Structures are given as C-alpha cells and as structure tokens.
Image (tube, helix red, strand yellow):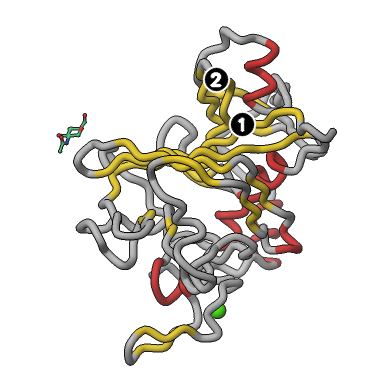
C-alpha cells in the first residue's frame, strides 16, 4: 500500500528552488497564462449557451478563490460538472490509492479517469443561493447501466473534513450511500484517506479481525466511510460481483461488479433563495 508523503519544508523548498538549467537560455520572460473562467460551473455555462458541447471548460464557482478546469457533460437536461470518472475498460485505468493531499487537490486526466478534488467539489457545492444535485452513473461488467440520484449534495470545508450531506435518493442503483442501517450510513461522515481517518470505526470488528481505518485497513482509497458502509466508488476494481471490498455500490441484495462510474453535479437556483 502506498506510503503517504508528509508535505513539509522539504517539499516547499524543492518547489520554490530556482530552475538552474544551463541548457536553456530564456530570451524573454514567459507570460503567465491566467485561466479565464467561462462560468461559475457547467450548469451556468449551459444556461448561458445551451448549445455548448461536452468538454473541458474553466469554471470559477461563486466564492472560489481561483478558476480551475473541469469536464462538463452537456445534456438536454442541463450542464453537469463531472467530479469523478473511472472506467476499467480504459487502456490504463488510474490508481485511486492516494493520500489526503491528492484527494484534496484532485488527480488524473479530465478527459479520462480522474478525481476533481475535494476543495473544488466543496466550492462547487457550496455556492450561495444554489442547490446541487448529484448523479451517480454506473456500468456493471455486463454493461447494464445503473443510476442513483440525490436531489441535494453538499461537501463541507476541509475543517469539517469535507463532510457529506445528501438529499433524497431516487434511481435504480439503490441508495448505497445510506445502506441498510445506521452503521452503514455515510451521510454526515467526513472524508477519509490512507493517511487521514475520519470514519466511524473506533475500531470496527469483522469476525475475528478488528481494524480502525476503512481506508487504510480495507479499501486503500479515499471516501466518506462510515463503518465502513456500502458505497466505495474510489476503491480498487473488484474481481467479482458481491465482493465485500473494492470499488462498490452495494444496495441490498444487488451487488454488481462495476466496470465504470461517473459522478456529476448540477446546480440550480435554490427554491427558497
Ligand atoms: C461491454 O462493452 C464493452 C465496450 O463496448 C465491450 O468491449 C464488452 O465486450 C462488453 N461486455 C459485455 C459483457 O457485453
Ligand atoms: Ca477510524
């Protein structure tokens, strides 16, 4: 399992060290290209230009300190900002066993497997006067599509460990985020990674085994684990249906082996604003 780097002075010094290369002779200063935001988020871009195509756009959510790039999934029902995308069928599926800093900032390729980053997801879902919805699209290994929709989705700030808030569920994938009982329920949980444990195992027991961290001792990925819960879409690819760990979205008896997932967010003016 990957060791997590401690982001300390050494890293900062390395990052700020001047590039001492005698091979390159700069004749002029390279201008810093500032990202020009095209909207608050993909939903906003879609409203402004309903014929905008799906692709990579620069957005700056209301209240965010800087613009950043996202993949917009432009559909007939609006513009959706993609926050996670995975496909085992890709030539080189991306490793999601990552530490806190990477889950915070995001990783991967926006046009391929990626995680947008908790700072960006929090900013996207915390815009004043806007309500965020979440759609989870899943493809199982038999190529059946499954979907879970939450009519509210909010990820809090880092000082709240990016705590998860969910609205009402609908869809055919099942409400795996909530599972069957209180120990499963991931709503209200903070985010955990290999190196940060904010889950509800204090510790957990599984037969003769006891363990303290769902991320470190079970999955290897980052997620809003409860104790540990039945949703883990950043987990490693499972070998078969019904696997108790790995990438999963398990609701009741239905525990598909997953081939691909996309998490996407749409914002609309909140009714009471
Ligand atoms: C699912 O779809 C992929 C890509 O279209 C294809 O390669 C694969 O064979 C399909 N799997 C099944 C079980 O149909
Ligand atoms: Ca724990």
Q: Residue at x 42, y 53 (%)?
A: 233
The x, y position of residue 111, in whole percent, is 44, 30
**In the drawing, does residue 117 fall left or right of residue 128?**
left
Identify the residue at the far right of this view: 273
The x, y position of residue 223, in whole percent, is 52, 60
Quarter of the image that includes the C terminus: top right
Mark closest to the chain's N terminus, 2 or 1: 2
Work out whether residue 32 can be spotted. no
Q: Quadrant of ligand 2?
A: bottom right
Which residue does the numbered mark 2 point to in the structure image?
77
The x, y position of residue 134, in whole percent, is 56, 40
Q: Residue at x 82, y 35 (%)?
A: 272
Asked if the residue under mark 1 is in contact with the one under mark 2, i.e. CB atoms within 8 Å, the reply is: yes
Q: Residue at x 52, y 13 (%)?
A: 53
Which residue does the numbered mark 1 point to in the structure image?
266
Q: Which mark is residue 53?
A: none
The x, y position of residue 58, in whole percent, is 65, 25
Q: Height in image: 259 above or below 111? A: below
Which of the two residues, 106 or 72, is positioned nearer the viewer here?
Answer: 72
Q: Residues within 10 Å of mark 1 (few under 14, many from 20)?
A: many
Q: Residue at x 46, y 37 (%)?
A: 109
Q: Height in image: 97 above or below 218? A: above
Quarter of the image that includes the N terminus: bottom left
Label 1 sits on a secondary structure element that is: strand
């Amino acid at each position: 399992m990957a060791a997590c780097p401690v982001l300390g002075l050494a890293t900062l010094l390395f990052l700020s060290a001047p590039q001492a290369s005698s091979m390159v002779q700069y004749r002029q200063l390279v201008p810093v290209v500032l990202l020009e935001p095209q909207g608050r988020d993909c939903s906003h871009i879609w409203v402004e230009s309903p014929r905008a195509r799906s692709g990579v756009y620069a957005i700056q959510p209301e209240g965010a300190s800087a613009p950043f790039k996202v993949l917009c999934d432009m559909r007939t029902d609006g513009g959706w900002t993609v926050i996670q995308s995975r496909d085992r069928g890709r030539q080189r599926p991306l490793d999601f066993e990552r530490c806190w800093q990477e889950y915070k900032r995001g990783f991967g390729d926006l046009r391929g497997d990626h995680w947008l980053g908790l700072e960006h997801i929090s900013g996207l879902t915390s815009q004043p006067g806007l309500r965020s919805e979440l759609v989870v699209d899943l493809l199982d290994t038999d190529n059946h599509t499954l979907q879970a929709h939450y009519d509210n989705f909010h990820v809090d700030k880092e000082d709240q460990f990016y705590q998860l808030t969910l609205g009402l569920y609908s869809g055919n994938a099942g409400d795996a985020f909530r599972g069957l009982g209180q120990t499963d329920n991931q709503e209200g949980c903070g985010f955990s990674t290999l190196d940060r444990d904010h889950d509800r195992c204090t510790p957990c027991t599984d037969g003769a085994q006891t363990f303290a961290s769902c991320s470190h001792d079970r999955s290897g990925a980052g997620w809003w684990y409860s104790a540990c819960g039945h949703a883990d879409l950043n987990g490693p690819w499972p070998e078969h249906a019904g696997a108790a760990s790995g990438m999963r979205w398990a609701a009741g008896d239905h525990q598909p082996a997953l081939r691909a997932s996309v998490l996407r967010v749409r914002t609309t003016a909140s009714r009471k604003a």
